[in-house]
Image: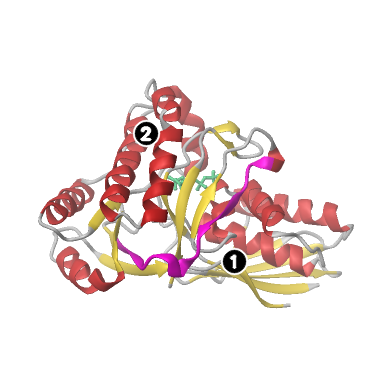
Amino acid sequence: MKAIALAHPNIAFIKYWGNRNHDLRIPVNGSFSMNLKGLSTKTQVIFREDLSEDKLILNEDEASGAGLMRVSQILDEVRQKSGINLYAQVISENNFPTGAGIASSAAAFSALALAASKAAGLKLDERALSILARHGSGSACRSIPSGFVEWTDGEKDEDSYAFTLAPPEHWDLADCIAVVSSGHKEVGSTQGHRLAETSPLQKARIADAPRRIRICREAILEKDFEKLASIVEKDSDMMHAVMMTSNPALFYWNPATLRVMQSVRNWRAKGLPVFYTIDAGPNVHVITLKENIAEVKKKLSHLEGVQNLLTATVGGAARVIEG
Ligand code: DP6
């Protein structure tokens, strides 16, 4: 009745932005990501006889409201599948700051899906786990499989899931995250996905998605850094163009965000393997090769407005560590 699971967040190379079905989180386009080793969420789930409701403790603080409801929805699904009718205590801890554009929900819901199903004695395969995690947070489905991951959009609930395109050892990429603001974001992704369709640019972004996905898949399999760099920056810029032209508009960048973007482009033009990608926040993920981490971090640390740097290499699958 108890299990602990660990999962990594992931950084999207081709972004998920907008849903065909908001309740089930079936996205309007497929996406790609890389798991981030070094950053992780550890979640313990215990189904207990003595509880009269689900209990959630997040980074040592008891949570209630919307966060708890979202967790209870996943627990309800697990209770329904397993026939268990006990409430659960969920204790979750991140080793990185939450709400700073580092997709804490991806690691959180993939660890929760795995720990809860294991604690309930369910034997779900990777695809079923990915679908369960997706119901909590779309991007969480990509933190279930290992390494470089593709999420097929799918038409129905059962065919929208993520799988490994290549294992972590396939390519020694690294993510140097330039933290330019560590505050909580004002508009979260869940709300953003609903606003996406109000931008006149979203239709064009969706129509071109299969092409970007094909190029991204080829670039990863061929380990072609230049090809990956240009498609990932384009995809991130396209998502932010949609955000900026939604109604109401979402502007996540600040002056330091732009400073990092511009510097990364300049460094690449001079031969350093680097590119940027930005999620729903101001922080910039600077992707490079593992051998260039020290140089990239040094350069980033000299830029005005860069408050902190986090580093990750390519991570494995979500895994059970106890239970
Ligand atoms: C910009 O998965 O956080 O990071 O399903 O509402 O939890 P919910 O949204 P979420 O959206 C992620 C948006 C993104 C792009 C991406 O990771 O693909």
Outermost residue on the top side: it is: 200
Is residue 150 shown in magenta?
no
As displayed, is residue 259 above or below residue 19? Answer: below
Outermost residue on the bottom side: it is: 322
Mark 1 surroundings within 10 Å by alpha-carbon count, few (fewer than 14), some (14 through 19), many (20 or more): many
The figure's colour scheme reads secondary structure
Q: Nearer the viewer, residue 234 or 212?
A: 212
Q: Can residue 256 be seen by looking at this rendering?
A: yes
Toward which corner of the image does residue 36 lie, by quadrant?
bottom left
Please name the amino acid that badge 1 sits on.
Ala
Q: Nearer the viewer, residue 23 or 170?
A: 170
Q: Nearer the viewer, residue 165 or 318?
A: 165
Instruction: Kindly identify the residue that appears in the image at 55 percent across and 46 percent down.
Output: 151
The label on residue 318 is: 1
Toward which corner of the image does residue 53 lie, by quadrant?
bottom right
Mark 2 surroundings within 10 Å by alpha-carbon count, few (fewer than 14), some (14 through 19), many (20 or more): many
Q: Secondary structure at mark 2?
A: helix
Residue bounds of the magenta highlight: 159-177
Side of 33 relative to 284 (left or right): right
Side of 39 relative to 44 (left or right): left
Q: Position of residue 15 (x, y in %)?
A: 43, 43
Position of the C terminus by quadrant: bottom right
Side of 272 relative to 10 (left or right): left
Query: Where does label 2 land, which residue?
Result: 243
The label on residue 140 is: none
Q: Secondary structure at mark 1?
A: loop
Please name the amino acid that badge 2 sits on.
Met
Front position among marks 1 and 2: 1
Q: Position of residue 271 (x, y in %)?
A: 13, 58
Q: Can residue 252 be seen by looking at this rendering?
A: no
Instruction: Kindly identify the residue that appears in the image at 23 percent across and 50 percent down.
Output: 257
